[in-house]
Image (cartoon, rainbow, N blue to C red):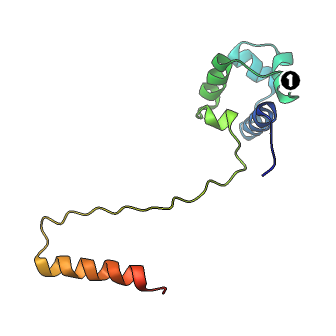
């Protein structure tokens, strides 16, 4: 996987959010109380915002902070385990045996 700096990640995410929401640097700067050149510096990867401004960006775009600070181009690994729970209170012993057989069938069907 390609390494990306925190500044690069923020820059890409911020540009994407601005484009998706049709927001200019000037509009964003006015909304969160910074200069347009500050927004420009974030996008050019010259500077990185303090956590308070990241929180304001997240609030402005109505997204979690991770949407601004974390890579969006990485596919998360699938979970290895899966748990299924069901209410067996109202099942008869015969029905429970059918459930057990079904579980065994699922576990062995591709072998």
**61 vs 1: above or below:** above
- Residue 60 placement (x, y as % from top left): 63, 26
- Residue 49 placement (x, y as % from top left): 74, 20
Left or right of 32: which side holds 62?
left
- Residue 13 placement (x, y as % from top left): 74, 37
Q: Quadrant of residue 51?
A: top right
Q: Residue at x 39, y 80 (%)?
A: 106
Q: Quadrant of residue 67?
A: top right
- Residue 32 placement (x, y as % from top left): 69, 17
Left or right of 75: which side holds 19?
right
**Number of dots carrying numbers:** 1
SS category of the residue bearing label 1: helix
**84 vs 59: above or below:** below
Left or right of 83: which side holds 20?
right
60 or 76, which lies in front? 76
Left or right of 7: which side holds 71?
left
**90 vs 3: above or below:** below
14 or 73, which lies in front? 73
Q: Residue at x 18, y 76 (%)?
A: 96
Q: Residue at x 69, y 33 (%)?
A: 69
Query: In the rendered image, which residue does mark 1 sit on?
Result: 40
């Amino acid at each position: 996987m390609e390494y990306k700096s925190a500044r690069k990640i923020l820059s890409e995410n911020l540009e994407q959010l601005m484009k998706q929401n049709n927001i200019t640097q000037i509009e964003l700067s006015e909304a969160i109380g910074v200069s347009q050149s500050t927004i420009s510096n974030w996008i050019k990867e010259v500077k990185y915002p303090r956590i308070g401004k990241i929180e304001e960006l997240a609030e402005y775009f109505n997204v979690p902070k991770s949407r601004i600070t974390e890579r969006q181009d990485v596919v998360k690994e699938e979970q290895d385990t899966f748990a299924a729970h069901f209410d067996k209170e109202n099942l008869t012993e015969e029905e429970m045996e059918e459930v057990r057989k079904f579980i065994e069938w699922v576990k062995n069907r591709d072998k």
